[in-house]
């Protein structure tokens, strides 16, 4: 089954809103073995919607529409579908009673303008919305399936999952789609391609590999289609095993996990704790760790020692070394890491100091020069020099990933 | 000028990646008086791209493509454009030399597979990419303009802003579009609408006002179109003046400035310094300050005192108070603010402690409860209680904005 996702709304075409609905829908379709062949965004309006339905008619079997089902004057989807299918419109009492009930439960009386949401094409199937007022709309015509959902994300997700999938899943064919995604850090796209060249060259016809690069990270995705689910799974697992062994220790996880979760697992399983001393990254690494709920299980905290005084006063970095070697130096990051490990009484402490740019570079230490320090209980303190130079924000993101990955690599072999 | 934005990539159609590029491009086009009539996402592949270019040919004057310019086997855009325009392909030495230079600067040698990115359609204009390897591609044919950009967001933005806009802006019609955007913090959309109701009701026909809400902030944009640029500017300035006086002290700047820049100006002009003690925000506020170059002029650093031990050991918060009132309390945030002001020897110190969720709430202190402390040299230490509850990430973002804005308001009247 082939699908086209049509998102409707002027706010999407002027860039006021990022469209997260269509990627969610695309993922759900893919997981149900519905191939999304196109996504389109069109303006509000009856004509625009009918035009796109005409244009796309022969390209797909399923048309998933979101948006334009609200009660205000710029919501046209129900009216557009009525016109497109040549249906009559009628006041749909069950929908209105549901809307009334929805308001009464909240101690309110529905405004008259909401009656519009119960004026619906007669022959269309109304999908009951438990989370909002607008019903979903479902229709089949000449082997084509149409589903229209509200634009509010949680209402859209509810109607798709709880109302639409139970109708459509039994109608789908037998071909299965299976995917596995491998997360890597520390190697670029081309380096990875070189490492798995042999696997890629001998890939079975029904399998494919995609590279999804990000700052400092690349995801490798293996996808396959086939009628025999077990055979397909075996093929994919076989290829996956090869890939994992070929890419080596840059591989850190599978699916949707994050480096922070890998560290969390590493640290909590050993009952050890982490602390940070950040200079140029200004709290970005700490922020990333804390953005995952449950970080307190292993992360004690960090010092953003942005000024030299903070490095000296809080972390005990020697003023002479700051003077002699500069804040971006092996000596200073080592003292920062050791200082914060002592101060926060943690088992592992990382530090970072560098020139994130665009200002602050020199001939000897150009923008993009970074030093990372790592102090681990019972081991010698280490320092690593890194050079990476995009814009300031990319530099900080890259270094954040680099620091997390370096901690992972250091801790993984003991 | 009408535009269609075409984003290319299988990863978008299977929902693995949320497409933020197209909304950024849509906003840029809108701001340049280019009307985006449609956004489309298609799969990787030469045929798919040529099909969509054919289909959309009559609907727009400008076609903005992103994605598919990388060096790997699933990148087809350059080849598709060559086929579409019937051009020859040739090795483009300047592009290759730039790619080589890009690698040499990083102490690396470019892999042979990157040569693909220098195999380019002969008659197409290559736009120099300062931030990556793939050049942008620009072509005009029969009154239509085609621009192809890499999918990596910062490369895409760089090529659109620095290479494409300078070419296209002079070609746009005589009607001028002028916009002014006013940044506010601390009031909601409907409150602002009430404040400027009179101005909005008496707005000249060629002007419009848009509300662009964000977490804790709302931007007010006044736009106008007209042939007489001076007259238009006058009208917009007149309306702007009214709006600024009506919205009061929630107004903090214009255009693209940020609260951090407002603070930077406030602090550096008085020669005073700032420090932070963050608990629940985990470094997010610090990260936001440091993400602006030149932050070191007023920002000394911060402590991410995520654990109670860190609050006590580093900031000197009383263990009895932590026990008695809990970490999210007036007493604790006051001691955190005072502690960090002393430790970092700064003039102004803010602290924050709260329950960002989804775990950690209680009957007495539900998720979304925050306390902010503020210690300013020569003044009594203050504490403010805040309640805000969306998801974890939104809560942290809201509180970050709230803290920066509270510092701004406290410092602006002295």
Image: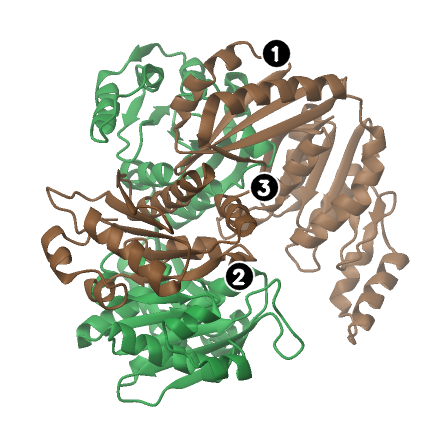
Chain colours: A brown, B green
> Where's residue A346, x and y in %?
41, 58
- The residue where tag 3 is placed is A42
Q: Which mark, residue B48?
A: none
Residue at (28%, 21%) from the top-left corner? B110
User: Is residue B332 shown left or right of residue A225?
Assistant: left
Q: Are marks 3 and 1 on the same chain?
A: yes
Residue at (42%, 38%) from the top-left corner? A409
User: Is residue B398 shown left or right of residue B157?
Assistant: right
Q: Residues within 10 Å of mark 1 (few under 14, many from 20)?
A: few
Q: Give the chain letter at badge 3.
A: A
Identify the image quadrant of residue B350. Answer: bottom left
Residue A288 to residue A310: above or below:
above
Q: Dot 3: what SS?
A: strand
Mark 1 to mark 2: distance in Å?
44 Å
Residue B287 to residue B245: above or below:
above
Q: Are marks 2 and 3 on the same chain?
A: no
* Front residue of A192 and B183: A192
Q: Dot 1: what SS?
A: loop
Q: Residues within 10 Å of mark 2 (few under 14, many from 20)?
A: some
* Front residue of A67 and B237: A67
Q: Which mark, residue A204?
A: 1
> Where's residue B56, x and y in %?
53, 28
């Amino acid at each position: 089954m082939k699908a086209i996702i049509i998102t409707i709304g002027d706010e999407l075409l002027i860039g006021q809103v990022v469209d997260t609905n269509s990627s969610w829908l695309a993922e759900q379709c893919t997981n149900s073995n519905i191939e999304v062949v196109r996504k389109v965004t069109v303006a509000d309006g009856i004509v625009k919607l009918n035009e796109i339905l005409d244009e796309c008619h022969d390209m797909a079997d399923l048309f998933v529409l979101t948006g334009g089902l609200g009660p205000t004057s710029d919501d046209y989807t129900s009216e557009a579908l009525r016109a497109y299918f040549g249906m009559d419109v009628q006041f749909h009492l069950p929908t209105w009673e549901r809307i009334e009930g929805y308001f009464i439960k909240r101690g309110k009386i529905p405004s008259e303008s909401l009656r519009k949401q119960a004026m619906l094409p007669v022959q269309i199937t109304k999908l009951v919305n438990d989370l909002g007022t607008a019903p979903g709309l479902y229709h089949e015509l000449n082997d084509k399936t149409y589903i229209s959902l509200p634009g509010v994300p949680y209402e859209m997700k509810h109607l798709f999952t709880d109302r639409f999938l139970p109708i459509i899943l039994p109608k789908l064919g037998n071909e299965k789609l299976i995917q596995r995604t491998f997360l890597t850090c520390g190697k670029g796209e081309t380096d990875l391609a070189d490492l798995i060249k042999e696997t890629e060259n001998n890939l079975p016809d029904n399998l494919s590999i995609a590279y999804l690069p990000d700052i400092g990270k690349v995801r490798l995705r293996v996808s396959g289609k086939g009628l025999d689910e077990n055979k397909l799974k075996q093929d994919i697992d076989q290829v996956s095993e090869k890939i994992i062994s070929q890419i080596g220790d840059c591989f850190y996880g599978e699916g949707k996990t994050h480096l922070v979760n890998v560290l969390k697992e590493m640290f909590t399983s050993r009952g050890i704790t982490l602390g940070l001393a950040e200079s140029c990254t200004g709290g970005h690494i700490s922020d990333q760790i804390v953005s995952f709920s449950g970080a307190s299980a292993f992360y004690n905290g960090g010092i953003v020692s942005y000024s030299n005084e903070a490095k000296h006063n809080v972390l005990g970095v020697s003023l002479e070394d700051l003077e002699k070697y500069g804040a971006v130096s092996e000596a200073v990051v080592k003292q920062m890491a050791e200082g914060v490990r002592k101060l926060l009484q943690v088992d592992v402490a990382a530090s970072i100091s560098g020139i994130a740019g665009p200002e602050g570079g020199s001939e000897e230490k150009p923008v993009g020069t970074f030093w990372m320090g790592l102090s681990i209980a019972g081991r010698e303190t280490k320092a690593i020099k890194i050079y990476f130079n995009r814009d300031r924000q990319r530099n900080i993101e890259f270094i954040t990933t680099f620091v997390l990955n370096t901690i992972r690599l250091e801790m993984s072999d003991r």
